[in-house]
Image: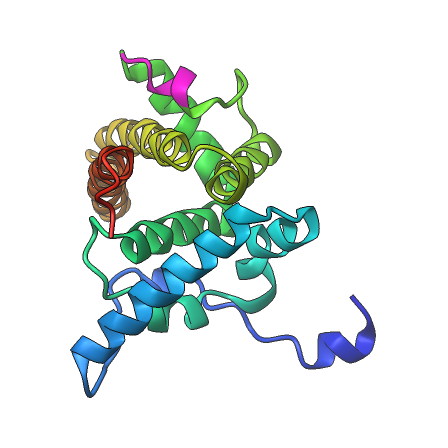
């Protein structure tokens, strides 16, 4: 990035500031209409002609612009809708990029503790360090635009379940000595578990051509 463009670089709003934020709107129906129309237009346009450079820019969007622009359109959409699914994927990506070390710690703990196929479905190497997790979440998001959309959603759901399991078990470890930290991890585990359920439901709806 040049010095000139860096001067006008938009600050990235971090996930902690956005996870529970509500965006005001004078006309919720209009916001919903715009959210759905933009999500469908974006996905249809890119998937019909998946130019590599365009996909690269979409995957890297939050690194360059933060997530405010997306949030204002998609964050208030119901979970089991296309804009709701895209919002969750972008927020998940930003969370991993923002703190890959913690993400790697949670993933590794979850991988060990969770007796399921989620680790295999998510597709991370073993063990998965910070760089590997950043690369994985970017590959998952890339699959939204140029691969099987339902598979990408299922991989993201499995990723969330592994992370949630890791956060839950770490919270148990910290509870006796650092209850505040345990509470933060428990909250993260619950949110990730909700995201996993939402993304899996969206994958099933997409396969039935019912994700609107």
Q: Residue at x 34, y 20 (%)?
A: 118
Picture residue at 79% right of the left edge, 80% below the top? 4
Q: Relative to 45, is 181 above or below?
A: above
In the rendering, at what x and y percent does residue 95 appear? 43, 50
Q: Is residue 144 magenta?
A: no
Q: Is residue 22 visible?
A: no
Counting the numbered discs, the total is 0
Task: Please determine whether, in this image, residue 132 is positioned above or below residue 121.
Answer: below
Quadrant of image for the N terminus? bottom right
Q: 16 and 201: which one is in front?
A: 201
Looking at the picture, how far across and down is residue 159, in whole percent?
38, 31
Where in the figure is residue 49, as x and y percent of width and height? 59, 48
Between 23 and 151, which is closer to the camera in this rendering?
A: 151
Position above or below: 21 against 123: below
At a point 67% along the width and 81% down the height, the residue shown is 8
Can residue 21 be seen in this snapshot? yes
- Which quarter of the picture shows residue 19? bottom left
Query: Is 5 on the left-hand or right-hand side of 124?
Result: right
Residue stretch in magenta: 116-121
Which of the 4 image quadrants contains residue 190? top left
Q: Main secondary structure of the magenta part?
A: helix
Question: Looking at this view, is 194 or 49 the one in front?
Answer: 49
- Among the 4 quarters of the image, the one containing residue 197: top left
Residue 64 percent location from the top left of the image:
61, 64
């Amino acid at each position: 990035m040049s010095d000139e463009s860096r001067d006008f670089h938009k600050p990235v709003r971090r996930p902690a500031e956005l996870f529970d934020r509500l965006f005001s709107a004078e006309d919720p129906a209009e916001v919903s209409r715009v959210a759905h129309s933009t999500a469908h237009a974006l996905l249809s346009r890119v998937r019909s002609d998946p130019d590599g450079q365009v996909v690269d820019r979409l995957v890297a969007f939050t690194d360059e612009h933060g997530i405010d622009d997306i949030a204002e359109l998609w964050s208030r959409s119901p979970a089991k809708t296309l804009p709701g699914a895209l919002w969750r994927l972008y927020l998940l990506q930003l969370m991993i990029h923002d703190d890959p070390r913690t993400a790697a710690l949670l993933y590794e703990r979850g991988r060990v503790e969770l007796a399921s196929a989620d680790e295999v479905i998510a597709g991370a190497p073993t063990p998965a360090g910070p760089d590997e997790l950043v690369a994985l979440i970017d590959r998952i998001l890339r699959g939204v635009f140029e691969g099987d959309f339902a598979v990408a959603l299922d991989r993201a759901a499995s990723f969330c379940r592994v992370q949630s399991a890791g956060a839950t078990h770490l919270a148990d470890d910290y509870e006796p000595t650092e209850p505040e930290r345990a509470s933060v991890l428990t909250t993260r585990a619950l949110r990730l578990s909700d995201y996993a359920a939402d993304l899996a439901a969206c994958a099933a709806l997409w396969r039935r051509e019912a994700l609107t």
